[in-house]
């Protein structure tokens, strides 16, 4: 663009009018990623009762598949009991109300509400709630922009890859590989959502993470550059399937791509144990004995074994085999001149070593293990330390030099310069394998394969660590939530470092293509209970969220295995039993579609109450109107009757944790007065602000 502007400047010297025309032409025409922007995108609202003026589709007869006739938009002209008069162009017809379904375009004005479906509370009462929202994600994003514009720290999404038959829907129908507009449909679909995502992200410091495969990664990269011109955008190639997927006469695929869109004053964190390397300082060592309360002997028998240390020279002479929990450690055979050291706390609690015997032998051989002083009166007579895996990797790669050796043979390593150790753009981590740490984790919960291609839990967690590892109160959003891996990963990250990050996940309730055919043959329709209960939100996302928090499988049994030790010889530095679950709170909601007039008449407060609670931080109880003049929790308040404004303001001022209030008034002066009386509080006006927000969105201002 710089070159064309220079050319226009040269033309202007000779012909100002021609330069003006060229400049206008350039401004009016897009240069960059070109695709069909005006493709329609509509969503069916199967749970909304048709009303006069609604645009509707006629549903196919039960037992029959969709056809072109079912895509025609009709307008409801009248409703009489169970019959509706609908019109299209010059044609009118009468149909049963149960055979029509309202549809909305992304350009239509919608007024969202929330209906609570379920919740789980295992965290502290003051902990924020995660949210799982069942909704079409475009409209859910509009609702989120009302609550969280500019407040989201990280968005992680795994959108449809547009690479398989019947893998994603556009306008209530699957996009086939031979569709000549499949790329334009995908780009239009993504662009609308990315523009809303941009409104959510904190412009001062935030990140968008998007995963994709080779079918659309080039177009996605251009779209991201076009949508986020101010951001620093990088792409990582990540191995997700070491077995790879065989293809005829093509390279076998075993990776995918991850775009990191970094906005504002962001700070990347490292995935290595050594986050910051300081010049002149010796690399720090970790204790070999695990310290977490869950890392007791019986939890991982392979990591409880004797280490024979010479009493005279304090060197490790031998590493014994693991002993089972039923064997007394004092009965283990001794080695002459040595002490058999086990991982035991001063209070006698038997813990675990950080690695299994074979890995410890490898580290001893390399000089990566050192022995502390002899303390014969303690249950563990010698302290033992190990060099973290990050510096070991640097030594073996030649980027970190060994300065010398101690008497016990352990290495001395001193940093020569200060630097931040960050991941490379090519990832090949065993824990990112989608089968072992995605599919198998779901099978542990569900005991069946009810979701295809889940992400590795640790792959998602690592992506989040890089951008919000130090933000322990970060807000994370995933509007292509799928099986719910992102929320699961946020809980795991919080469990590791004591954080209070919260996650809002959005997913629709679609069934798979095979299930759809089966249900149609059974004369079911979307919206029927026996159809909806198998939708992804009800059947996968929310059950996984509940089960992982409770530490239970779908049948109520304890989950098997531990987080933090997912593969042989991998030392995560923590070991959390899955059966313990997480100390977290979560709520499951469904997006509803409300009418403007009940909201204006203050008859729909219960429908929008969860959105107000969400805007106030998802903490404490939800305020639901029960006839009082004002209501408050420890975190927000709602003033219904302005005559009680003095008492309301006193209550808010006396509760320091209240940061958000809502005032129900159609009088601008009254609203302004409350703002002045509560200068340090975020004051919102109901219902004018709420209605106006979505009227603006619905007018197509995002395109």
Image (tube, helix red, strand yellow):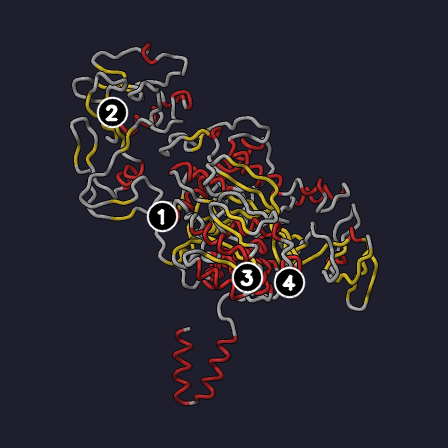
Q: In this view, does 658 lie above or below 362?
A: below
Whole-angstrom CA distance, mark 2 to mark 1, is 34 Å
Crowding near pointer 3: few (<14 within 10 Å), some, many (20+)?
A: few
Query: Which mark is in front, 2 or 1?
Result: 2
| Disc with the residue nearer the chain's start (1 vs 3) | 1
| Residue at image mark 4 | 40
Q: Is residue 37 above or below residue 530?
A: below
Whole-angstrom CA distance, mark 3 to mark 2, is 63 Å
Is the N terminus in the top left, top right, bottom left or bottom right quadrant? bottom left
Query: Which mark is in front, 4 or 3?
Result: 3
Cβ atoms at labels 4 and 1 below 8 Å apart = no
| Disc with the residue nearer the chain's start (4 vs 3) | 4
Whole-angstrom CA distance, mark 4 to mark 1, is 41 Å
Q: Is mark 2 on a helix, strand or loop?
A: strand
Whole-angstrom CA distance, mark 1 to mark 3, is 46 Å
Check residue 158 in the rendering and tell me which mark sits there, or answer none: none
Camera sees residue 224:
yes
Cβ atoms at labels 1 and 3 below 8 Å apart = no
Relative horizontal placement of residue 590, taking residue 394 as reference (left or right): right
| Residue at image mark 1 | 424
Crowding near pointer 2: few (<14 within 10 Å), some, many (20+)?
A: some
Q: What element carries label 3?
A: helix
Q: Which of 31 and 702 is in front in this view?
A: 702
Cβ atoms at labels 4 and 3 below 8 Å apart = no
Cβ atoms at labels 3 and 2 below 8 Å apart = no
Q: Is mark 1 on a helix, strand or loop?
A: loop
Question: Which residue is pictured at 51% across the width and 71% down the height?
Answer: 30
| Residue at image mark 3 | 689
Check residue 383 in the rendering and tell me which mark sits there, or answer none: 2
């Amino acid at each position: 663009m710089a070159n064309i502007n220079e050319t226009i400047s040269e033309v202007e010297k000779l012909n100002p009018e021609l330069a003006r025309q060229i400049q206008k032409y350039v401004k009016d025409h897009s240069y960059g990623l070109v695709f069909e922007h005006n493709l329609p995108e509509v969503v069916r609202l199967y749970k909304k009762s048709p009303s006069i003026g609604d645009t509707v589709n006629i549903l196919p007869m039960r037992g029959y598949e969709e056809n072109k006739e079912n895509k025609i938009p009709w307008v409801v002209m009248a409703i009489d009991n169970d019959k509706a008069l609908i019109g299209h162009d010059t044609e009118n017809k009468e149909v049963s109300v149960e055979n029509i379904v309202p549809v909305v375009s992304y350009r239509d004005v919608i007024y969202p509400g929330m209906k609570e479906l379920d919740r789980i509370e295992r965290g502290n009462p003051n902990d924020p709630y995660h949210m799982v929202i069942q909704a079409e994600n475009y409209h859910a994003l509009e609702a989120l922009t009302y609550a969280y514009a500019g407040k989201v720290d990280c968005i992680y999404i795994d959108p449809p890859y547009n690479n398989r038959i019947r893998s994603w829907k556009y306008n209530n129908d699957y996009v086939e590989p031979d569709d000549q507009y499949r790329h334009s449909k995908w780009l239009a679909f993504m662009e609308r959502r990315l523009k809303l995502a941009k409104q959510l992200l904190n412009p001062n410091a935030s990140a968008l993470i998007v995963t994709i495969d080779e079918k659309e990664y080039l177009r996605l990269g251009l779209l991201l550059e076009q949508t986020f011109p101010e951001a620093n955008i990088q792409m990582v190639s990540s191995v997700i399937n070491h077995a790879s997927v065989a293809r005829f006469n093509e390279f076998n695929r075993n990776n995918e791509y991850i775009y990191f869109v970094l906005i504002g004053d962001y700070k990347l964190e490292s995935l290595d144990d050594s986050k910051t390397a300081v010049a002149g300082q010796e690399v720090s060592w970790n204790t070999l004995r695990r310290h977490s309360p869950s890392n007791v002997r019986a939890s991982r028998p392979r990591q409880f074994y004797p280490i024979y240390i010479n009493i005279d020279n304090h060197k490790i002479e031998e590493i014994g085999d693991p002993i089972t929990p039923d064997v007394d450690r004092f009965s283990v055979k001794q080695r002459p001149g040595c002490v058999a050291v086990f991982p035991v706390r001063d209070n006698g609690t038997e813990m675990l070593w950080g690695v299994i015997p074979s890995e410890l032998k490898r580290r001893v051989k390399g000089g990566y293990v050192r022995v502390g002083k002899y303390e014969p009166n303690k249950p563990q007579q010698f302290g033992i330390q190990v060099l973290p895996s990050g510096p070991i990797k640097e030594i073996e790669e030649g980027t970190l030099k060994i300065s010398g050796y101690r008497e016990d043979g352990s290495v001395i390593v001193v940093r020569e310069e200060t630097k931040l150790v960050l991941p490379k753009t090519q990832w090949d981590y065993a824990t990112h394998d989608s089968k072992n740490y995605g599919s198998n984790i779901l099978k542990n919960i569900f005991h069946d394969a009810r979701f295809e291609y889940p992400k590795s839990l640790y792959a998602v967690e690592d992506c989040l660590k890089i951008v919000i590892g130090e933000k322990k109160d970060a807000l994370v959003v995933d509007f292509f939530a799928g099986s719910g891996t992102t929320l699961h990963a946020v809980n795991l990250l919080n469990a590791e470092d004591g954080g209070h990050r919260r996650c809002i996940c959005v997913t629709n309730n679609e069934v798979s293509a095979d299930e759809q055919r089966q249900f149609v043959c059974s004369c079911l329709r979307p919206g029927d209970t026996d159809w909806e209960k198998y939708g992804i939100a009800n059947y996968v996302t929310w059950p996984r969220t509940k089960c992982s928090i409770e530490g239970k499988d779908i049948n109520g049994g304890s989950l098997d295995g531990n987080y933090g030790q997912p593969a042989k010889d991998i030392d995560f530095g923590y070991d959390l039993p899955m059966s313990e679950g997480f100390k977290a709170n979560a709520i499951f909601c469904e997006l509803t579609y409300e009418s403007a007039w009940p909201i204006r008449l203050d008859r729909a407060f219960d429908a929008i109450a969860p959105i107000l609670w969400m805007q106030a931080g998802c903490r404490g109880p939800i305020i639901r109107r029960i006839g009082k003049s004002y209501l408050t929790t420890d975190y927000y308040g709602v003033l219904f009757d302005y005559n009680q404004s003095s008492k309301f303001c006193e209550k808010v001022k006396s509760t320091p944790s209240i940061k958000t209030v809502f005032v129900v008034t159609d009088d601008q002066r009254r609203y302004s007065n409350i703002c002045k009386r509560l200068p340090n509080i975020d004051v919102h006006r109901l219902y004018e602000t709420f209605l106006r927000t979505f009227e603006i969105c619905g007018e197509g201002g995002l395109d």
